[in-house]
Image (cartoon, rainbow, N blue to C red):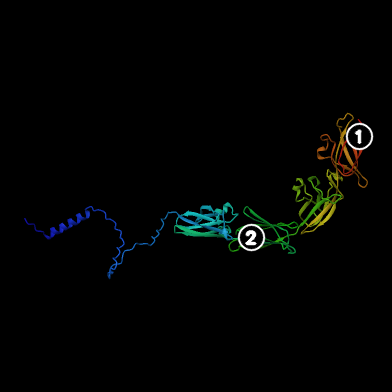
Amino acid sequence: MTRHWTPLSLLGALLLASLCWWLWPREPELAVTPSAPAAAPAGATPVVGAAPPLTADVTAPVQREPLRNEPLLLHGTLTRLGGPAPGRTVQLFAEVQLVRQTTTDAQGRWAFEVAPGSHRLAVPFVGVTEEELTTFPYRGHRHPPLAAALVQDAEVTDASVFVALTLPTGAITVRALTASTALPVAGANVALRYGMHELLTTTDAAGIAHFEDLDPMNHSLTVSARGFEVFQDGIELDALNPRRHLDAQLTPVGAFDLRLLDDVDAPVEISAAMSAVVTDLSSDTPVVPSNIRELRDTPRPKVLRFDDLQAGRFRIALRDEECGEKILRYLPVDATDPIEVDIPAGAVTPIDLHVRYRAYVRLRAHDRSGAMGDGVLAVERLDEQMGTLRILPAPWQRGSRSGDTHFDGYLAPGTYALTFTSGERQYRDTLVVTRENVDRTLTLPW
């Protein structure tokens, strides 16, 4: 039986065939790699209008954009004075927040792994405190950023961004001048401090001192010279003012050096027991040596230094006026009458005081049985001009004897009267002292 296709049935059949074709599973297509065309036979004539031969694509692949959170490398070098700056801290900030920090290697290299975006690099200058390390980049900080560190921003979009950092350097010149005359002060001590660091130098003949290769930051300056008040000031170096000059105006004051000379003009070592009594006559106040702590050192100093004095007249003596009597304490040397000197301002005046050595004397008293005498020994110096001078006992001997001696101390050359008193009994004797030490035992007549 012959079937006749109507247009409607023909359209349905076509739709069903198309659906089966789309749903029918197919084998995966094999990738076809174009190959180079075969070489034309020798002597062949090229075909005019033929397609050009296929060639391989040798261009570099296009670098893809990094993912948003993929680590990137931000690295570089740090130099100072034309060479690498090893061991310096390099900090990484996200806006005002300190994120990480590292230290440059021997070649001044540093590196951070960062996320894409804007970053701030900071290199703190030497001497910046720990607090400043985390506060200087903040907006509104009272110090400009370059006063505390080298700061540089970097935009990271590629896989590796290189930043070359160079630390600026500065210099300070100081000139020490006398405030009243503007004359230079040579040999003044100049100290420049920043953080925990300190640089020391002295002024030359023109009163000038130089400091080079400084980090831009705040510095504290101190200029001192004997005969002048101490000068102090602050100096700030930054990128806009890397070199500064300062005139230090020094106010003159009085100062003098005191030496004790023996009978052959040789300086005598000065102990704490030999401290001179120096009095400012304008105010009738005692003056203490500036090197008083050295008097107990070994070897002892041979000069007493007096500083920061008001210009005027001073009295110098080695005598003690205790109890209203002129007495000679246990000093190794003896001096003549006190001297008075005028001390000017702006200079160090040398003063020599001539002294006589005193002998070291140990005296004891024993009775006839050889036992220590129970009593008190009085020692008095017989002087033709000044009369009798009582020699006070040592502080530990006042009111009682100590150890196996009744007298133990220094006596100047001369003649002394000895009086031993025990109850109502007394024993008198004399003692002649030269420069030789004395160790003597008195035999009591009872």
Q: Is residue 178 visible?
A: no
Mark 2, residue position: 212
The residue positioned farthest toward the top in the image shown:
369
Residue 136, image quadrant? bottom right
Q: Earlier in the sequence, mark 1 or mark 2?
A: 2
Res 387 quadrant in image: top right
Is the residue marked by circle 1 packed among few (<14), some (14-19), or many (20+) residues within 10 Å?
A: some
Which quadrant of the figure contains the C terminus?
top right
Residue type (three-letter) at the residue carrying disc 2: Glu
Task: Tell me, for residue 216, which label it has, or none.
Answer: none
Give residue 19's position: percent from left, percent from top.
20, 55
Report whether 1 appears left or right of 416. Answer: left
Figure check: 49 above or below 96: below
**Could you tell me which secondary element the residue under label 2 belongs to?**
strand
The residue sitting at the bottom extreme is 48
Q: Quadrant of residue 128?
A: bottom right
Q: Relative to residue 153, is residue 366 depicted above or below?
A: above
Q: Which residue is mark 1?
A: 426
On the rendered structure, is 27 left or right of 85?
left
